[in-house]
């Protein structure tokens, strides 16, 4: 983690509501309550992306943190099947994004990941590249922890 990873502070998560994979009404991918880690995944036919979602769900280091997976497509690929499995260590909510709202808002095609603060301001975003070079889940956890201690309202004091 270093400052050169920090992105344009004006970059924000979109307000658009997406449909959860599986079941449930559309909702915004970030709650506004705590920082959020988010991965953008390929949809149909991409095992590396589904495999990373499985890895995130099994990551104890992400337990209790807000983590979202956005499947950039109709949500009928391998990731869809994971939703039927009981959550492991981390509750990773997964959404379908057939209109590619997230990619359009952030200029970020899948596979990619980001961490935003509770206000939806993106602190870091990275492409995983064609080779699906995903970060260790602990790196995402570290960024979420970092985001939780950065508060523009109170000059960096934790709330
Ligand atoms: Zn993929």
Image: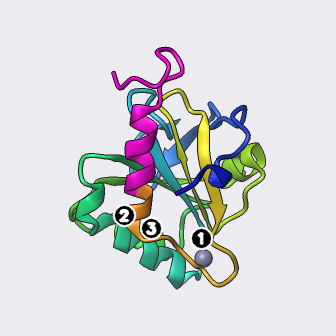
Q: Is mark 3 within 8 Å of ligand 1?
A: no
Check if residue 11 falls in the magenta segment.
Answer: no
* Residue that carries the numbered disc 1 in the rendered image: 43
> Callout 3 environment at 10 Å: few (<14), some (14 to 19), or many (20+)?
many
Span of residues in magenta: 141-159
List the single residue furthest toward the top: 153
* Residue that carries the numbered disc 3 in the rendered image: 80
Seen from the viewer's position, the closer of residues 51 and 156 is: 156
Earlier in the chain: of badge 1 and badge 3, it is 1
Q: Specify whether 48 is left or right of 6.
A: left
Q: Secondary structure at mark 2?
A: helix
* Residue that carries the numbered disc 2 in the rendered image: 138
Place residue 146 in its image quadrant. top left
Q: Is mark 2 within 8 Å of ligand 1?
A: no
Q: Are marks 1 and 2 in contact (CB under 8 Å)?
A: no
Seen from the viewer's position, the closer of residues 129 and 88 is: 129
Q: Specify whether 36 is left or right of 152.
A: left
Q: Secondary structure at mark 3?
A: helix
Place residue 73 in its image quadrant. bottom right
Q: Secondary structure at mark 1?
A: loop
């Amino acid at each position: 983690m270093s400052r050169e990873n920090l992105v344009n502070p004006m970059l924000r998560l979109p307000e658009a509501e997406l449909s959860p994979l599986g079941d449930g009404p559309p909702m915004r991918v970030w709650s506004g309550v705590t920082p959020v880690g988010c991965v953008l995944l390929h949809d149909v036919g991409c095992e590396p992306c589904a495999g990373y979602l499985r890895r995130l769900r099994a990551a104890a280091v992400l337990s209790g943190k807000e983590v979202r997976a956005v499947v950039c497509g109709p949500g009928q690929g391998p990731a869809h099947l994971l939703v039927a499995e009981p959550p492991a260590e981390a509750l990773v909510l997964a959404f379908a994004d057939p209109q590619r709202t997230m990619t359009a808002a952030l200029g970020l095609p899948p596979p990619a990941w980001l961490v935003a603060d509770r206000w939806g301001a993106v602190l870091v975003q990275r492409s995983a590249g064609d080779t699906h070079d995903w970060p260790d889940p602990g790196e995402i956890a570290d960024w979420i922890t970092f985001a939780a201690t950065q508060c523009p309202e109170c000059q960096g004091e934790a709330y």
